[in-house]
Amino acid sequence: MELRLLGGAEEVGRSALLVNDSLLLDFGMLTDNPPQFPVETPSPDAVVVSHGHLDHVGTIPALLSGRNRPPIHWTPPTAALARTLARDTLKLHGGTLQCPFTENDVKRIGEVSETHGYRESFTAAGHEVTFYDAGHIPGSTHVLVDDGDTRLLYTGDFHTDDQRLVGRTTARPDADVVVCESTYADVSHDDRQDVEERFVESVERTLWEGGTVVVPAFAIGRTQELMLVCAAHDIPCYVDGMGIEVTKMLKRNPEFVRDADALRAATSHARFVTGRDGQRSRITDQRAAIITTSGMLSGGPAMTYIPQIRANPTNKITMTGYQVEGTPGRDLLETGRADIGGRVMPVSAQVEQYDFSAHADGSGIRDFLDAYAGATVLVNHGDRCTWFAEQLRADGIEASAPAIGATVTV
Ligand SMILES: [Zn+2]
């Protein structure tokens, strides 16, 4: 089996792996300024997508811009999220070099989309492919690819602990080669329940003192997770941004969430913000949590909320995910000021960070790989892939971290 790494090697973003020059796994986008895409746009016979995050699915429509119309295989939530993200990219960058596809390319997704559930094998570009639940976000998969000689497990992003929205990964299908994500290989997560308890206590304290809490959150997965947390602890909350559309889509795909009843209850508990009639300004003096995109304060309705609540030290901003260097969210945590919508502003409101991760940490990844003793491990999707591969080798695992653009025969 021949593997070519077109992106996501020694980096997080623009994941893309070409198998035997014919089957493409993921085709993502690295959100940067300007955005970055896989190093090459191949003409695969078929495409398989592990899950609906921008760094795995963001550049998919560009594969449909020429004559080539490869079938795209994914789970139903991933198919829906791919469209949502593509439309958002068009809105942000459409018609510029920063957007490698057109509205027509996005429309063509409907012609080539083939959805599959977990553990139902199908054929793609002559390979037998099976999806297993990866426990990362709804519809996320480990992708098992068998070319007749070699079995490849492409882990995609995965989590080895339960979240409220999705349960942990449990499947460990036999494989000869594992391409393994390593986002948090050098991190040890705090116990999830402790993180949630600290978050709830902090939000409740602020509301009790009469403040408002803005909760920046990624639209896909994190927004719904925090809605579930708020509902479970009866914290009044509003939800704003792309997370609303994603929540509605997940309610239509109940078999891909851990507890569909809980999500329904959380949706009734939350109030969705329409933004009409100055609603956003009005709710910023209410004793409530406002869950809103973007998760790193680089756009979205958060741009309206932060300026309104920032001057009052009773208010609070709770970051709920990893903040990439150079983003306003990271600046705010480190310096207490941030560029919000083109204006650098000091923030007197309290700023806190909570690790609601959807990825396995170092020991989670090691536990996962324990099931693959004897397999060859290729480390990708991380800032320290080479370092992690060295750690694995020191423990007797045949591991390496191929560079971007490299071709590996396994
Ligand atoms: Zn992901």
Image: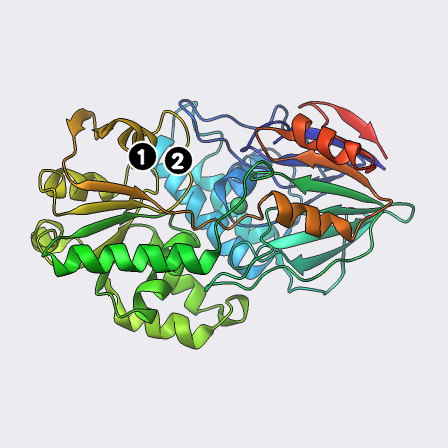
Residue 34, quarter of the rendered image:
top left
Per the image, the residue denoted by label 2 is 323
In contact (CB < 8 Å): disc 1 and disc 2: yes
User: Is residue 58 visible from the viewing direction of this image?
Assistant: yes
Compared to residue 65, the image places residue 292 above or below, namely below
Secondary structure under tag 2 reads: loop
Q: Is mark 1 within 8 Å of ligand 1?
A: no
Per the image, the residue denoted by label 1 is 329
The amino acid marked with disc number 1 is Gly
Secondary structure under tag 1 reads: helix
User: Is residue 48 visible from the viewing direction of this image?
Assistant: no
Image quadrant occupied by the C terminus: top right
Q: Horizontally, is 36 left or right of 174 in the view? A: left
Q: Residue at point 16% right, 28% down?
A: 345
- Residue 265 is tagged as none
Residue 230 percent across, percent down from the top left? 30, 64
Residue 124 percent across, percent down from the top left? 75, 50
Residue 43 percent across, percent down from the top left? 69, 33
Q: Which residue is most to the right?
A: 149
Residue 323 percent across, percent down from the top left? 39, 35
What is the spatial separation of the Cα atoms under label 1 and label 2, in whole angstroms? 6 Å
How packed is label 2: few (under 14 Cα within 10 Å), some, or many (20 or more)?
some
N-terminal-most mark, 1 or 2:
2
Q: Residue at point 58% right, 55% down?
A: 140
